[in-house]
Image (cartoon, helix red, strand yellow):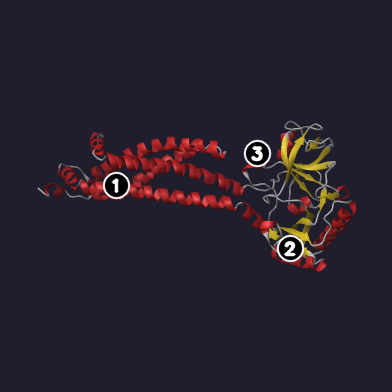
Amino acid sequence: MTVHPILAALRRHKAGVTLITLQIALTLAIVCNAVFIIGQRVERVNRPTGMDERNLFLIEQEWIGAPSADDPASIEKLDAMQRSDLATLRNLPDVESVATISSLPLLNSSWTGGVGLKPDQQHGTANAAYYFGDNQMLKTLGLHLIAGRNFAAGEISHRGSRGTGEPPIAIVTKALADKLFPNDSALGKTVYLDGGATPTTIIGVVARMQIPATGRWGNSFAWNSVLQPVRLDASYTRTALRAKPGRLNAAMREARKALFDANPMRVMENQPDIGIGIFPFSEIRARAYRADIGMAILMGVICVILLAVTGAGIVGLTSFWVGQRHKQIGIRRALGATRRDILRYFQTENLMIAGAGVVLGAILAVGLNLWMMQQFAMDRMSLLYVFTGVIALLALGQLAVLAPALRAAAVPPVEATRSV
């Protein structure tokens, strides 16, 4: 079958052909970028924190009437209150491990700074998030120590939350170790935190620990973390707890009751917006990625709607053309054309329209991605998304045209004699 009759027919329906071509092009451009965004969001949501998240929960609370000054007496009193809480929690039957902690991955509350290789280095060799905690931090969070050792109990110091000073030792993540010492082991090496002159020796390396921030600004150092053996003292505290397997809810209830029994002068009712309460880590993860999940769902709905509208447009236009060409189809049947010939004609016609649409759409898809890279700092979209979109739109077009094409193929030769 030659394409000349098809081209001649399409030239007589320029408006309809143009509209469908543009609709296919716009659908391809939007769907490719939407699916790319969905893929990025899904990847963000599923990236591991480096912790064993099962049976892990967090207590965020504030004492009422506790000292707020940074003088030594106030800090010592706050530290005594915190150590008392830790002892209370460690005696609970359903609690396996307890650690004071300054923040957690995905909590969006962090200390960040530069890590340098020289004293007073103005611009750090790498950016990193700082976690402050005690010697139970690795065990409670389920971090995997791949080199070196953990902190010893005697190495834990304490200071006010607004205090300064760098610890003599630290544990870093593998990503940060590789960034600082790409050709050598980080163990025993000296680094300088926050552009200071006090040396800090790396005594251990953990496989992974994600930074608390989930915003785009932290993507460049998402796995660069420094664990410091420091217990921060303030009227507001965070404590990480690991429940015994299968006892998470019971441990959370026990912890709340035990803490209020020990000292009722505290605020601990669940208020996630201000960082107060007792939360399983699963809730922290869900809260951190709520916007990403919502965006992925929205993009998915948009893709489904666009594909449905495009398919319906192809069905409607082809059905209209079939209705207009009943007599011509009957004549072709009378001249010897088979049902398969008629079916192939409409499928080829649709393929030509869809082909023009996907070529234009592929150009628009790449252009839209380049524009979003400039405006929203998005990543470059792989051409695989465009190629897959082209195949999907062509397949959708062939599927959409099938029903009206089958109706056209069913037109009997007698139609050629009607209205004569």
| Snapshot quadrant of residue 395 | top left
Q: What residue type is labelled 1?
A: Leu
Q: Where is residue 228 in the image (x, y as percent from the top left)?
A: 80, 45
For the point 36% across and 48% down, the residue is 311
For the point 49% across and 42% down, the residue is 33
Q: How far apart are marks 3 and 2 (CA)?
A: 35 Å
- Residue that numbered label 2 is attached to: 268
- Residue that numbered label 3 is attached to: 220
Is label 3 in a helix, a strand or a loop? helix
Discs 2, 1 touching: Cβ within 8 Å: no
Of residue 232 and residue 293, the one placed in the foreground of this image is 232
Q: What residue type is labelled 2?
A: Met
Q: How far apart are marks 2 and 1 (CA)?
A: 63 Å
Q: Distance between the residues labelled 1 and 3?
A: 49 Å
For marks 2 and 1, give the one nearer the viewer.
Answer: 2
Residue 317's tag is 1
